[in-house]
Amino acid sequence: DSYIHRSGRTGRAGRSGTSVCLYNSRQEMALKEVERRAGIKFQRVTPPQPEQLIQAAVTDATRCLDKVPAEVLPAFAKYAKELLATRPAEDLLAAALSHISGLTEIKKRSSLSAVEGFTAYQM
């Protein structure tokens, strides 16, 4: 009842909303009980995979780059040319996107449990 009441506050005054529930495997049965009692079915989604995180990070980093005023770019042009002489442009841009987004380490996770270093197999 408490969960339904609190999540119901998401869409007040006739408006709709989205309620997100984070849970672990020990809470699965309690969540199913909430579904049964409330007559609803939650949409379950898996944790994001590394490729999805990278896509989101690049989108955010691109927004940051788009906010840099054009009049500032000439101040960095000399240094950009120097860097381009030392490494491939694609590697430089990839490193910059990684740094800007803060995603400088990619950890593999299970697609079922999201446990780091584990892999899910279908048999």
Image (cartoon, grey):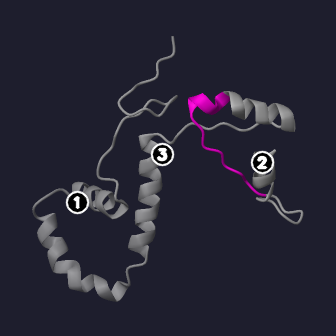
In the rendered structure, find residue 92 and report the number of the disc placed on it: 1
Mark 3: amino acid: Gln
- At x 42%, y 56%, the residue is 57
Mark 2: amino acid: Ser
In the rendered structure, find residue 2 and report the number of the disc placed on it: 2
Question: Dot 2 lies on which element?
Answer: helix
Name the residue at the front extreme: 2
The nearer-to-camera label among 2 and 3 is 2
Mark 1: amino acid: Leu
The nearer-to-camera label among 1 and 2 is 2
- Residue 89 image-quadrant placement: bottom left
Name the residue at the right extreme: 14
The CA distance from mark 1 to mark 3 is 21 Å
Looking at the image, tell me whether mark 1 or mark 3 is earlier in sequence order.
Answer: 3
Residue 70, horizontal then vertical, whole percent: 36, 84
Magenta stretch: dominant secondary structure: loop
Residue 77, horizontal then vertical, whole percent: 21, 79
- Depicted 34 relative to depicted 118: above or below: below
Residue 32, horizontal then vertical, whole percent: 74, 30
Is residue 52 or residue 105 the one in the foreground? 105
Magenta span: 17-28
In the rendered structure, find residue 52 and report the number of the disc placed on it: 3
- Residue 99 image-quadrant placement: bottom left
Q: Residues within 10 Å of mark 3 (few under 14, many from 20)?
A: few
The CA distance from mark 2 to mark 3 is 33 Å
Q: Disc count in the image?
A: 3
Q: Give yes or no for contact between labels 1 and 2 (Cβ–Cβ under 8 Å).
A: no
Looking at the image, tell me whether mark 1 or mark 2 is earlier in sequence order.
Answer: 2
Q: Residues within 10 Å of mark 2 (few under 14, many from 20)?
A: few
Looking at the image, tell me whether mark 2 or mark 3 is earlier in sequence order.
Answer: 2
- Residue 66 image-quadrant placement: bottom left
